[in-house]
Amino acid sequence: MRLSIHNLGSIASTKIDIAPLTVFVGPNNTNKTWTAYALYGLIQSIAQPWRTGPLGLDPFEAAQFDAPFKDNITRTLNQVVAYLNSGTSDTTSVDVKRDILIRGVGFPFQTQFNYAALQSLLALKSPLPSDTIATLEVHENDLPRVDDAMIMHVTKLPQGVELGVQYSRNGQATTGYPTAARGSDIPSLANIISQLLRRLAFGAWGTVLTLPAERISTTSMYFRSFMFQPPGVQGPIHSGPVIDFGLYLDRTQYFFQPGRPESARVQKSPLAALLEQHILGGRVGFTGDTTPRSLEFQLANSQSSLRIHSASSIVKSLGALDLYLSGACGEGDLVVIDEPEMNAHPAAQMAISELLALMVNSGIKVIITTHSPYIVDHLKNLVEASQVSSQSHRESIGRRLKLGTEKAFLTPDKLAVYLFSGGEVTEIFNRQTRTLDWATFSATSDEVANLYSDILEAEPTQ
């Protein structure tokens, strides 16, 4: 997967190859977050069957598809249209073969957001230049691995239809969020269903999640109050990823709702236990029988709990990650985290680095921005550790890690580090030599050390 950016903020032009763990570093105000959000928005629009892009734009309109792909969509669509034209009011099920849908796709294909879509995604007050564009190139091996068969359930409503999708990933059944397609005429409904089918060809991506820098305040008041529009303010006041994050918190409470059938519950990942035990010191969850339910932090080895706004900053920073790892997480997901080190002690930052590596080794793609040399330095440790051949030495090193497992070792091909500086984006991690250009951090460290030396020299002799 490759992201291309043209004329976005200070970035004139760049191409970024997305690795399983992609890290953006560099000074402030170099558009690391904008780039990460552009990537998130493009993948979100492709991967989630129920989503449209910023401003309601359909990224598929800009995608380069071959004619056979459109024919495959039409054949499946015709089955639904035949049902809509029938006199029956029952729910019908349509088998959707994913391999047939994507058989006509010319890989790699490209999709993009123009300046207006990016301006809406980022909730910018000032307009972007008209030639600003973000393009995502997707290869077939970038698509999540899911079982071929999917079933689309179509139910007639008084003024439209309700669509739901069932698919399986690694043999585990998953049900997508139902969505209502409103319309009084068959052509308009068919157009909406056609868009859904196109997304299903690339969907079943699982969760596409962003943890924005605003997550601490948003988590503290997750009852959507952050979405209210102040009087007299025109246009969106929060970026799309921030709003999506708030909506994610709101939706997640239903995964853990009391009385939910066991068959519909999600299994907690072992990664959640590592996060809770070694970083948070407890677990984040919902309490109460009515919605909206209270989001609270349960202290480890205690019956006491705190409402989330009273918990420590790192709990508010990574609480949503705990919910994600405790819920619907799995292979093929994508998680974007703006500064995962936020409010974390250096030792916790090392543990966070290991957790990110474990997520990647579990098949979750991770994109982060960071200003922490601890994060980057320790990721390099994990890469170097993966090259140790002696099993006894590997086990010994693994025990010394904060999370205590060699499963956090990261092979070089899974890591990419990009430096944003001076309007340019440069890859600074060499996978062959496993070396990293440390200038962005070492220059500041040298400056601090040199200043201290000069201060000592300036002190009067005792």
Image (spheres, grey):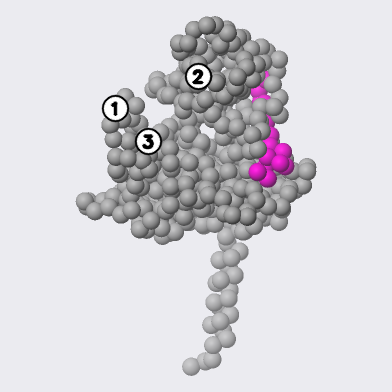
Residue type, numbered disc 2 = Leu
Q: Residue at x 64, y 20 (%)?
A: 188
Q: Which residue is mark 1?
A: 262
Please indicate, yes or no, whether residue 384 appears anywhere in the rendered image.
Answer: no
In the displayed structure, 245 sits above or below 459; it is above
Q: Is residue 169 left or right of residue 404?
A: right
Crowdedness near tag 2: few (<14), some (14–19) or many (≥20) residues, C-alpha within 10 Å: some
Image quarter of the N terminus? top right
**Which of these two is toward me, 357 or 320?**
320
Disc count in the image?
3
Is residue 118 a member of the stretch shown in magenta? yes
Disc 1 or 2, which lies upstream in sequence? 2
Q: Position of residue 381 (x, y in %)?
A: 46, 49
Crowdedness near tag 1: few (<14), some (14–19) or many (≥20) residues, C-alpha within 10 Å: few
Label 2: which secondary element: strand
Crowdedness near tag 3: few (<14), some (14–19) or many (≥20) residues, C-alpha within 10 Å: some
Q: Which residue is mark 2?
A: 157
Disc 3 or 2, which lies upstream in sequence? 2
**Which of these two is toward me, 113 or 244?**
244
Q: Residue at x 58, y 43 (%)?
A: 240
Q: Which residue is mark 3?
A: 254
Q: Which residues are magenta?
A: 106-120
Q: Is residue 320 left or right of residue 443?
A: left
